[in-house]
Structures are given as structure tokens and as C-alpha cells.
Amino acid sequence: MPRLEIAEDGFRLDDRPFRIISGGLHYFRVHPEQWADRLRKARLLGLNTVETYVPWNLHAPRPGEFRLDGGLDLPRFLDLAAAEDLHVLLRPGPYICAEWEGGGLPPWLLAQDGIELRSRDPRFLEAVDGYLAALLPPLKPYLSGADGPIIAVQLENEYGAYGNDTGYLADLAGLLRTHGVDVPLFTCDQPADLARGGLDGVLRTVNFGSRAEEGLDRLSRLQPAGPRMCSEFWIGWFDRWGGIHTTRDAADAAADLDRLLATGASVNIYMFHGGTNFGFTNGANDKGTYRPTVTSYDYDALLDEAGDPTPKYEAFRETIARYAPVPDEPIPAPGPKLAPTVVELDTSAALFDQVELFGRPVLTDRPLTMEELGQSVGFVLYGTELPAAGPAVLRVDEVRDRAQVFVDGQPVGVLERENHEHALAFVVPRSGARLAILVENQGRVNYGPGIHDRKGLLGRVTVNDEEPAGWSSSPLPLDRIDDLAVAPAGPLVGPAFHRGSFELDRPADGYLALDGWTKGHAWINGFPLGRYWSRGPQTTLYVPAPVLRPGRNEITVLELHATTTRTVELRDRPGLGPDQD
């Protein structure tokens, strides 16, 4: 593929004027067997480029380890993009935000006391160097200089909203070049942060969702020559637990796209297809109050969570056709969906009886953080002995993020970071009673200074103002559930796994509804669908067709509290919650 050039009058490709018309499509939020479908629909929209982040934390789950397999096979994704004649904007971080767990920064970095992320801290830069040394060599054949689809690479991500150390950005640029990136680099920032987040010699781009002329004018004042581009044209938004489902009118968004394209600028539509925060991958925000992001990353995008074109797809296709060629092919029809099916979950297992399946408890004089345990996501179960019977007050400096408290296996209350809760009163029934605290990582903060987001029980933990003498800290990453010792369902107190099966003639996309369930996680055939919570707005979990199989299929649900029913339902449509007014 031809090489992208940055000229004073705009982008040039193969020495011809070129406008980037791109859409966001994160391979790690889409089942790999569905990549080809989504990329084909990008081409049919009229896009000539797709954009993707690269999540460092998934590719390098532990220090010294690097994965490019399965759903992380980025070279395969790039091959599929090239097969559709799509260019690629690659955004490798190291920080990506993306409403993703920790902004893509691996949590093992936080096992080092005092480390400063997104800085010139030598420990951070050494880790970034190792990451890029593992990521970039396999991608060299995919750079446009080697006839590959990658035409540009982003340097950091909205850094101006976090810091202003150009030395740090220069270090990153040097590392990218050292590890073989020979295509143009670019930065992206919101209009007010453009000066802080850029680096001389690197193309600046701007992010916004409306007022295109104003945003582009601010970019031009700082960068008078060269291409003008909106690297994130926000056409929807993400949701948080306890909020409302955010939508944006298709005609309104298309009108703003029209105004943007009328200026001659390039664009990356964020998002073309949002996808799903499968498993434990959602991030969170904390601007004074911690707010975890929901499982769905539908984003009110052009393709919905199942990859079906929305009315916004049609509106954007009509708009793009005024400025660029659009394939003379019909808009793709929605894919097949599962027939509504009720499934009984007829076997169960108490979570606390399965603890040693996931890791051995570590005995110390204080609760260990998740990072100290070498764990990324999931839960930690803390335990200690209570010395005396009678009234007790548990106090915790910091709960990260949600703690369920038990005495001798009986639930006595919940402490939530979101509600700024630090204390809980209960009665201890006997001397030597066992205090257990199950702490859930609900998603590391992905934006702002809160990215230094260690998980578990932080600081002092006291009972009646005394620190218990000994603690066990048991990691529960819930990364393997095949060996659960389930038995015919009966009454269980506390968190429990529930399992059942159903038969299918032919797999298709669907949605798992958990009406009557409270809070927890769900899997189908061992594939982690993500979190559910009666708090909403989301009431279903997307089930990709490739995780299903003809014949028998298995559903596992971890319910953290209680349920009014033993059944769940597979449906043919999503429940993302009531829209905003």
C-alpha cells in the first residue's frame, strides 16, 4: 500500500491528495471470528481507513509475557483490514483511555511503590520499551513502507488532559522510531489541551463531537500548516452503572459530520463499532466519585453491539457519499438472532468453597493489594479472626472497589467506593468468629490522575480501632471455571455459581437477560460475557454467535447476592436501558 505523507496543504498518499475517512473499531472488543464482517461493513459505509487502539494490559498480562494469539492476533486483524483495502491508524498507547481497564496500562506496573505512570520515571519507560520491543517487530510488515495497511501511528493519547512534559513525549517518539515505526506519528487532544499535549515535529489532531469549525480553528491557530484532522469525532457515548443509556440523534450527528467534512478536514468516527467490554475489561472514571463503566460498549455507534447497521449507519453513509466514493452495494441486513429461550440453572456451587481453584491464600500481617498478589482483575477474598464477641465496627481507609462483608459465612453488609463508604457496624456472635471480606475490582480508572488505581483493601483496616493481627489474602481472578464442583441446586447463603445448559440447532447472536438476578458475572461455554447488575441501565449481555455451538451449550452465572429465580433467558434483542431525554 502507498505511504502517507504530511504536506503543507494536507495528507498525500502515493503523491496524490488524500483525505482520511476512518472509523473506530477495536479488535479486542469484538470476537475474532467477527472481525471480517465488521471490516466489510466499514468499507461498505465508505470508509477508507479504520482506527484501533492496542491494549498493553491484555497483550502483556504479566511482566516478560507477550501475547498475539486468538482475540489478540493483531496481525490477523491487519490482514483482514488490508483484504478490504482499508488503511489503519494504529494507537498503541502505552496509555489508551478507551473506557478500558486502567486505560490499557498493565496493573503489574502498580506493584512498584511510587511509580509515576505516563512520565519519564525510568521504571515506566523501561516497561514501555519492553512493550514496544515485543509489539512492533511483528507489525513491521504491516507498516505502509512495507506495503502494509498501517499509514500512521499515534503517540500517546490525549496527553494534554494529563500532563505537559514534552520530554516524555519525545522519549516515546524515540522509542517508536527505535523499534521500527517509519510512518508518520500524530497526537490527539481535545481543543483546550492541544498546546499541552503536542510535540514539535509530530502532527497534532483534535477530538470533539460538535462545533467542528471551532475545534478545527483552534487546531489551525496552533498548527497553521499541514492536514487538519479530528481523530475522535464522538457520535455517541459510553454508559456507567446506575446511569442512563446515552444516545445521540442520527440526524444531529450526521449534520455535524457534514459540517466537518465540508471544511476539507479528515476524520475518524468514534465509534464506527463499539463492541463489548467482555469479562473484567471495563474501565471507570473518578472525578470525585468513582463511576464504573458498564459491560456494553455499544456507544450508540453506526454498528450496534451485534454488528448490525443502525439508522446512524445509513445517515452517515449518505453524508460520506457527498464527499467520497461509497460502494454501490446495499446496506447489510441485520444478522440472524437466537429465538427467545428460557434456561434453568439447576446446579450450584458456593464461591467460598471454590477459592483454592483460583489460587492459594497468602498469609500476612495486613491485607495485600491485588497488585501485590500479582493479580490483574477479579476479586480478592480477605480473612481474619475476630477476637471477641459483641458489637463491632469495621473501618477501612480505602475500599477498591466494592467489599461484601461476612461473619462466619453470614453477610453483614457492603462497603462501596462509589458511595464513599468506609465503616460498617455488626455484631460478632462468638470469640474467634471468622471475618471475610470479598472485594471486587469493578474496573481501574482510565482517565485523569486516578489511573494509579490499586485494588483491594488499601491502608489501615481496623475492628473496634484495633488492627487484626493476621490476614489471609486469596486471589480470585475467576480465569478458569471449568472445574467448579457444582451440585443440584439448593439454598445457598453468600456468593454462588449457578449453572445450566440448553440445546441449539444453529448458533446465532443473542442476548442473555438476567431478570431477577442482582449482581455478578456470566459465562457461556467458558467465554466471559461480562458483568451484570440490577442497578442498570444495561439489562442484557451480548452473546456472540461464535461462542455458541450446535447441540449442548452451558451457562454459568456467579451471583454475588441473591436471585428471585433459577432461570435466565436468551433473547433476540438487547436491553441497554432507557435512553436519555
Image (tube, rainbow, N blue to C red):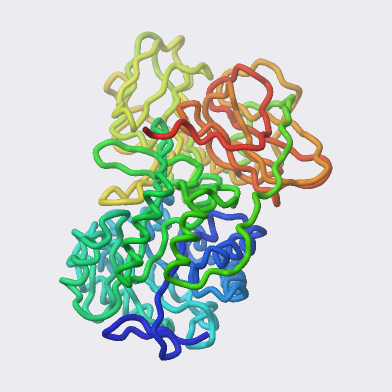
Residue 80 % position (x, y): 61, 71
Q: Left of 77 or right of it: where is 206? A: left
Q: Residue pushed farthest bottom?
A: 15
Between 135 and 215, the residue placed more toward the observer is: 215
Q: Is residue 409 above or below residue 522?
A: above
Residue 445 % position (x, y): 35, 47
Q: Residue drawn 26% across and 66% down?
A: 121
Q: Residue drawn 63% across and 35% down?
A: 512
Number of callouts: 0
Task: Tell me if I can see residue 506 in this picture.
Answer: yes
Q: Is residue 140 above or below residue 21?
A: below
Between 139 and 296, the residue placed more toward the observer is: 296
Between 273 and 118, the residue placed more toward the observer is: 273
Q: Left of 92 or right of it: where is 70? A: right
Residue 326 % position (x, y): 53, 69
Between 74 and 114, the residue placed more toward the observer is: 74
Q: Is residue 99 above or below residue 442?
A: below
Quarter containing the C terminus: top left
Q: Residue drawn 35% across and 10% down?
A: 391
Task: Tell me if I can see residue 365 in this picture.
Answer: no
Q: Residue pushed farthest front?
A: 322
Q: Residue drawn 16% across and 71% down?
A: 221
Residue 315 % position (x, y): 47, 54
Q: Left of 47 or right of it: where is 115? A: left
Q: Is residue 82 above or below residue 66?
A: below
